[in-house]
Amino acid sequence: MLKTEDAGRTAHSNKPRVHVLTQMMTQSTSTDGNGARPLRTPQGGAASGPMPQRDPAPTTGGPSRPSCHARGRGRRVTGTTTTRKIKALMRPRTNRDDYHTLSREQQVNLIRLRTGHNRLNAHMNRKFKLAPSPTCACGQEDQTAEHILQRCPLLDEERKEVWPSPTPLQTKLYGSRQELEKTTTFITSAGLIV
């Protein structure tokens, strides 16, 4: 399909109008440097009409997003990177978890303890069969983050040094920065690799 546009005279020049000619390529044509020619169908014949569109990703029943072309129609292009950065600076700050203020190593240890995806026996045995059994070296329970942080008798001394009074697991994993630092200190002093 051919499309013509007129570029009018500018206010500062007396040059004649320029005609701009653009050609829209459909999806059923291909250019390989030798001009446009129809694509071949899998059966060997030339495609007679536009090729069928396939969904880029199957949906799971949720609301579908319009394509990038549909989203851009009718909008003025003002979303520059600078504009987005300025808007981001103007938004009110949201409260963040204190773990963001810790070092990367401390963050990794805390996330592994929170999610249970760690190198403790329970996870390594159940998911990967790399540990001989899920039980802790104390022999009482499975070696989980909760067992290590709360009840393991082999780690009682280290636990009492870090937390002299009983502290709930929720506070140890999701508390203030000081509590989170205590948790990571306990893990390193116990010699555990999580």
Image (cartoon, rainbow, N blue to C red):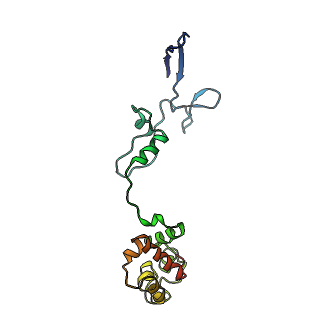
Q: Position of residue 130 (x, y in %)?
A: 55, 78
**Where, by quadrant of the figure, is residue 87 drawn?**
top left
In this view, the residue in front, 190 or 119, is 190
In this view, the residue in front, 175 or 119, is 175
Q: Position of residue 53 (x, y in %)?
A: 45, 39
Q: Is 168 rendered above or below residue 32?
A: below
**Where, by quadrant of the figure, is residue 45 drawn?**
top right
Q: Position of residue 111 (x, y in %)?
A: 46, 69
Which residue reaches farthest right?
34
Q: Residue at x 65, y 29 (%)?
A: 33
> Does residue 55 appear anywhere in the picture?
no
In-image side of 130 versus 150 (left or right)? right
In this view, the residue in front, 96 or 115, is 96
Q: Residue at x 51, y 68 (%)?
A: 108
Q: Is 158 rendered above or below residue 178?
A: below
In this view, the residue in front, 63 or 1, is 63
> Does residue 48 appear anywhere in the picture?
yes
Total count of labels: 0
**Where, by quadrant of the figure, is residue 14 drawn?**
top right
Q: Is 80 rendered above or below residue 62?
A: above
Q: Is 151 rendered above or below residue 49?
A: below
Q: Residue at x 41, y 83 (%)?
A: 150
Q: Position of residue 10 (x, y in %)?
A: 51, 15
